[in-house]
Image (cartoon, helix red, strand yellow):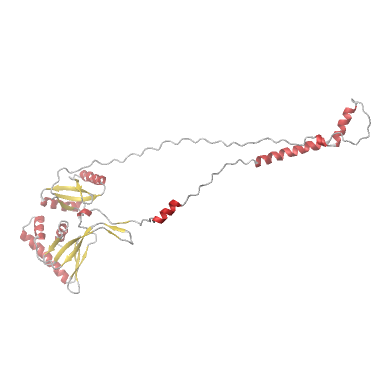
Amino acid sequence: MTGIDRYISELLFDHDCVILPGVGGFLTNYSGARIHPIRHSFQPAARTLVFNANLRTNDGLLIDYVSRAQSISYQQASLLVNEFAAQCNRELEAGKTVTFNNIGRCRMGKEKNIIFDPDENSNYLADAFGLPSFVSPAIKRETVRQRLEKQLTPKPSAPKEEKKINLRPVIGWAAGIVIPIAAAVLLYMYSPTIMDGLGNSYASFVPTVKFNTSEPAVKPGELNKNAEFADFRVIPEKLSEAPAGPEPEKAGEAIPEAVVISVIKKYQIVVGAFSKESNAERYVNELRGRNYDAGIIGKSSNGLTRVSISGFDAKKDALSMLGQVRSDENPSAWLLVIR
């Protein structure tokens, strides 16, 4: 291709119909944002392309644009456009596919009609510049009945756990020590040898008289058989917790200073459109760091902040700079006309 398709692509941003004389016309149709119900994909608004082979008459738009873009006469531009159209017709008649960069492909059908396949990656809607398609998972929502049931269902209160001190191990340990000692003392006191020894020891001091009696010297009921146990209590101690130190403060992210063009020239080369103004400001500062006269030129109809890399009063200078920007910085840069 001789580059005529590039001029057609540039004209489609500002015109609804661009005719290639002798071949046909390229038309743009507005298509709103779309949501796929199964894949949950979101497509931004766009201007889609269609081709009409019946629009063959020269309206002068394309030839005039080529003449001004290449700084040649109208007759010379007409020769270039007609030569390009003749080349396209020869390739179509030969059964080949003609590719128009950023526009689409044309081929000849069985019934000698031109079939056009548009480029799905191109969007000629300036307000949708920089908006990609994305996929978002479906949101599961509760019905009104489910929300009411959840609100009316009483929540069971959790029972409070009471802390109980278990004294059984302590009592068992004390009983295991005291009971054997008490039993040993009782057996020792009731031993016959001990009782007889005590009687013989006191016989030399006290006069004795012999009686025929069978009463025991000591009655078993006079002995204290009750064992005393020590009282044990366990008091839990609450450990003190060290106070947590203050969390370190997060340093705020520096927001670049806004760079807005006060005097906007008629022809602006747009290289980006952002939903957040801070991102647009960062991009402007980045471009100015590369010695471009960049700036913010307002917002589009859907609220996107546009970034211009340079502005011109003459369209010729703007088109020349547009080619350089597409080659060096951004292939998707486009020309905005401030009316």
Question: What residue appears at the point 6 percent right and 59 percent down from the top-left corner?
Answer: 74
Residue 152 vs residue 225: left or right? left
Q: What's the residue at 10%, 57% (across, down)?
A: 65
Residue nearer the viewer, 177 or 229 = 229
Check the picture and name the quadrant holding the N terminus.
Answer: bottom left
Is 170 above or below relative to 38? above
Q: Where is residue 72 shown, x and y percent of the image?
A: 7, 57
- Is residue 319 in view? yes
Name the residue rendered at 77%, 38% in the picture. Answer: 183
Pick the front one: 225 or 314: 225
Q: Number of marks in the image? A: 0
Q: 307 and 326: which one is in front?
A: 307
Q: Where is residue 132 in the image (x, y as percent from the top left)?
A: 27, 55
- Image height of 276 relative to 118, above or below: above
- Viewer-nearest residue: 21 or 286: 21
Q: Taking 248 as reference, is 272 left or right?
A: left
Q: Position of residue 298 (x, y in %)?
A: 19, 47
Q: Where is residue 155 shown, x and y percent of the image? A: 48, 49
Based on the displayed image, in which of its 4 quarters is residue 149 positioned? bottom left
- Residue farthest to the top, as pictured: 205
In terms of image quadrants, where is residue 28? Answer: bottom left
Residue 2 at least partly seen: no
Can you tell which quarter of the image residue 42 is in? bottom left
